[in-house]
């Protein structure tokens, strides 16, 4: 059968989708987005990022390399997917219509999508909000749509979606707490096998096995393990290196519950830590505490970042730090558990609100020597950031 027949048979078999949240929660999310649309003057939003699609409809898949598009109008949602995604689009999505296109011909979607844009927006000259900075929106599709919709206006919708997604509901916070517990167990399992002579793959395997066994779904980022001098090189991962005496072992894991991730970083030393490693550890905890204390509802993102900068000052010339003191987490898919682009950084004057959730990735790296990282996933409150994760913040020195 073709994908259209497959869709129809699935819809007949499963008239109601399987969802992570109650329908009322999805309705509330859409209502918030539609209020933002009205304020910005949009007739339609064109969304392509997997986390956004999941957040608004429930759509969940492990295949995020293909072009999927969600149209959100004032009274209607339409989901476009390639043939191989018809299953999750029907079974796991709450939308008014699912439309497929040939997997092998992604260019074929533009014409049908243009027709649906006009129909869904209710005007031949729709004002369309989209994200020109996302990697999930293929430039070829945007170009084709502009050719098909000459009277349409395409405008960057900015932080419209991010602002809605940042504030978590009680149900979202519950999934994040479940993730945090599983992540912590994974880090504990990994720590238990760290010793001189073990290969970094084995540390990652212990953590992954623990998290999957405890109920994690497929992870948005696989377990990160780096050892020795490589721990001072950002975004490297386990690659068959044997742990030696004196090595720093950096781990960063994030288990998934209903696509929600509460990540954590942790660091250990095989043998006795040097005075400088201990110093980096102490500053790392100072930065973490400073950011958590300053990240209060009503204060700015930038003020929390500036507090972190002040705590980092004693070693700022020796330690590399990314400059981001926190990033949003929530519904996410590979290749990253980062859920949005509103970061705790000194150039972001947006205002924090209660129940926003961030991962605070405080890792300080001395190039060519070592890296020390400890982090928490936190919820914003009126008095500061409250831990969702319960990390072990001590620098474990593993006996030889």
Image: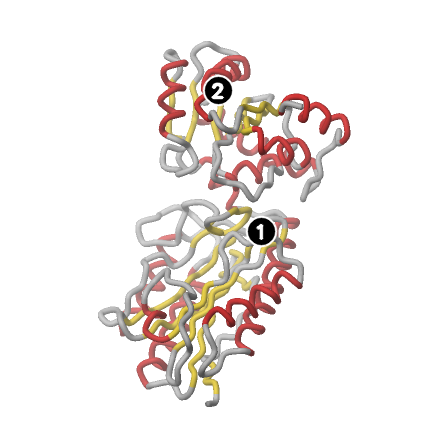
In x, y percent, where is residue 142?
38, 25
In x, y percent, where is residue 232?
32, 69
Q: Nearer the viewer, residue 44 or 168?
A: 44
In the rendered image, the residue lying farthest to the left is: 317
Between disc 1 and disc 2, the foreground one is 1
Q: As displayed, is residue 181 above or below residue 256? A: below
For disc 1, the neighbor class at 10 Å (few under 14, some 14 to 19, many from 20) is many
In the rendered image, the residue lying farthest to the right is: 13
Q: Residue 128 carries which label?
A: none
**Tag 1, which secondary structure?**
strand
Q: Nearer the viewer, residue 96 or 234?
A: 234
Q: Mark 1 points at which residue?
A: 260
Q: Name the residue under label 2.
A: 43
In x, y percent, where is residue 235?
37, 60
Q: Nearer the viewer, residue 45 or 230?
A: 230
Between the residue at mark 1 and the residue at mark 2, the CA separation in whole angstroms equals 30 Å
**Tag 2, which secondary structure?**
loop
Q: In which quarter of the image is residue 369?
A: bottom left
């Amino acid at each position: 059968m073709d994908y259209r027949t497959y869709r129809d048979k699935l819809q007949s078999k499963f008239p109601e989708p399987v969802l992570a949240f109650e329908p009322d929660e999805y309705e509330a999310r859409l209502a918030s987005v539609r209020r933002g649309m009205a304020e910005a003057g949009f007739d339609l939003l064109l969304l392509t990022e997997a986390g956004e699609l999941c957040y608004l409809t429930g759509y969940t898949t492990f295949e995020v390399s293909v072009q999927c598009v969600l149209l959100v109008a004032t009274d209607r949602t339409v989901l476009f997917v390639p043939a191989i995604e018809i299953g999750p689009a029907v079974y796991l999505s709450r939308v008014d219509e699912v439309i497929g296109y040939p997997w092998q011909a992604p260019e074929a979607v533009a014409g049908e999508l243009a027709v649906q844009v006009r129909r869904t927006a209710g005007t031949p000259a729709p004002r369309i909000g989209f994200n020109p900075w996302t990697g999930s929106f293929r430039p070829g599709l945007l170009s084709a749509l502009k050719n098909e919709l000459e009277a349409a206006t395409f405008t960057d919708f900015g932080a419209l979606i991010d602002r809605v997604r940042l504030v978590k509901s009680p149900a979202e916070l519950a999934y994040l707490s479940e993730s945090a517990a599983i992540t912590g167990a994974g880090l504990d399992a990994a720590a238990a096998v760290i010793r001189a002579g073990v290969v970094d793959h084995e540390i990652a395997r212990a953590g992954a096995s623990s998290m999957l066994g405890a109920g994690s779904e497929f992870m948005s980022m696989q377990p990160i393990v780096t050892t020795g001098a490589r721990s001072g090189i950002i975004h490297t991962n386990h690659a068959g290196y044997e742990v030696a005496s004196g090595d720093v072992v950096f781990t960063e894991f994030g288990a998934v519950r209903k696509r929600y991730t509460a990540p954590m970083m942790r660091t250990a030393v095989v043998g006795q830590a040097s005075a400088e490693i201990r110093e980096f550890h102490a500053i790392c905890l100072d930065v973490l505490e400073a950011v958590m204390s300053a990240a209060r509802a009503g204060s700015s993102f930038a003020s929390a970042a500036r507090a972190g900068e002040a705590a980092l000052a004693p070693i700022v010339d020796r330690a590399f730090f990314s400059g981001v003191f926190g990033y949003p987490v929530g519904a996410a898919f590979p290749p990253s558990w980062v859920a949005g682009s509103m970061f705790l950084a000194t150039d972001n004057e947006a205002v924090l609100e209660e129940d926003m959730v961030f991962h605070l990735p405080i890792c300080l790296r001395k190039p060519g020597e070592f890296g020390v990282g400890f982090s928490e996933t936190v919820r914003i409150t009126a008095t500061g950031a409250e831990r969702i994760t319960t990390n072990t913040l001590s620098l474990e020195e593993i006996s030889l």
